[in-house]
Image (spheres, rainbow, N blue to C red):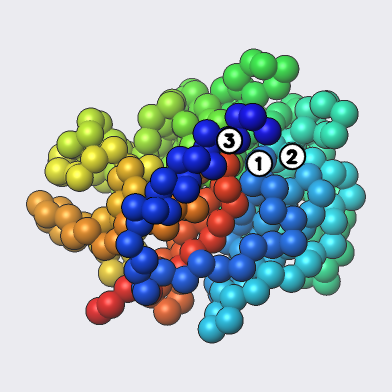
Amino acid sequence: VADLIPLRLRSRKLEALWEPDARWELLPLPSQVSARYVSFTPLGEDRFALITLRSAEVLEVDSAAAWRSLPLPRSPRSHHAAVRLPSGELMITGGLAPEGTALRSTEILGLDGVWRDGPELTEARLRHSAVVTTGGTVLVFGGEREGRALVTTERLRGDAWRRYDDGERATTRGNLWPGDGFAVLTASDYFVWADHGRVWRLAEGALQMRTDETATLLDAEGEPSRDIAVPGMFRSAIQLRDGSIAAVVERTLYRGREPFDAWEQLAELPPRLRGNLSLTELQDGSLLVFATEPFLQAARLRLSE
C-alpha cells in the first residue's frame, strides 16, 4: 500500500495539470478492478476479453460501452497469455497458479460460453506472449519460469504443441504489447524477434525503434527498408486502417503519415491512462487505449476527420 501512495500523489498532480478534452471518453471499469497480471485480448467486432486471477469479463465497445461477465476458467491463473483463435474462440495459455506454480495447461472458451481443457504446452511458462499468424498458426513464445528467462517458441499443430525451432531467440515479459521484448509478424509471417527492444507490426512489414529520434521500417521479409523520424521513444503504437501510425510518446498521442517526415499531435492522455498501454482502432475509426498497472482504465478517443 505504501508503494501506491507516491503513485496516487503523482496521479493527482497529473489530474490537476490536465486540461479536459471532450474527445476522450473514459469507459466504465470492470467489476474486478485489479490492474495486475491481466490479459486483454481483442475478440473482433469491438469486443475485448479481460481475464484476471479471479475474474473473466468482456468489454463491448459500442455507443454505450459496457462490461459483461464471462464464465471463470477452470484453473485460476495470472501472468498468462491469451489469444483469439481463428475459430473465434479464446485460448489462455500457461501462467502462474495461486500457489505459485508455473503452468503448462491451456484452456479454451468455446463459442457456447463453456471452458474446456486445451492441449498442454511443452513446458510451463509465465509472463510470455501468444500470437496468431496471418495464416492462422498459433505461437507461444518467451516468458520465464522459476526466475529464468525462456527463449523457446511453441507452435500449435493440430491438437498438440510442438517446439518451433527457427534458430532465433524470442524473449518477452508480459502479454500486454509492446512489453519489454516480443515477436512481430509481418504480412508474409516473417518473425522479427525484438529482444528487449521495441518493434511494431505494420501491414506490409514492421517498425523498429532505434533511438528517441529514429525508427527503421522493415519490409515484408524483415529487412531494413528506410529510417524515419519519430517524435520520441514509443510506449505503444499501432498502424491504422488508412496506413498511418498512431503512437504514444510519454503522455502524448501522435499520428504519422507517409512519408513520416512530420507527426501530428492528436491528444494528451488522461491522467489515469498510465503504465502498460495498448492501442486498438475501433470500427468507427476511434482509438481505444487500455492501461494497466498501477491503474486499470480504458478510454476511447474520437478522432476528427
Q: Is residue 305 above or below residue 43?
A: below
Q: How many discs mark residues in the rendered view? A: 3
Which residue is drawn at the image coordinates 58% and 48% (left, top)? Answer: 295
The amino acid pointed to by label 2 is Ser
Q: Report the residue marked by disc 1.
A: 36
Q: CA distance from mark 1 to mark 3?
A: 17 Å
Judge the density around disc 2: few (<14), some (14-19), many (≥20) Cα neighbours within 10 Å: many
Q: Which residue is mark 3?
A: 5
Q: Viewer-proximal residue, 87 or 82?
A: 82
Q: Quadrant of the N terminus?
A: top right
Relative image position of residue 79 (x, y in whole percent): 69, 37
Whether tag 2 and tag 1 are in contact, CB under 8 A, the answer is: yes
Distance in Å between CA atoms under marks 2 and 1: 8 Å
Residue at position x 61%, y 56% from top? 41
Circle 1 crowding by C-alpha within 10 Å: few under 14, some 14–19, many from 20:
some
Which residue does the numbered mark 2 point to in the structure image?
A: 78
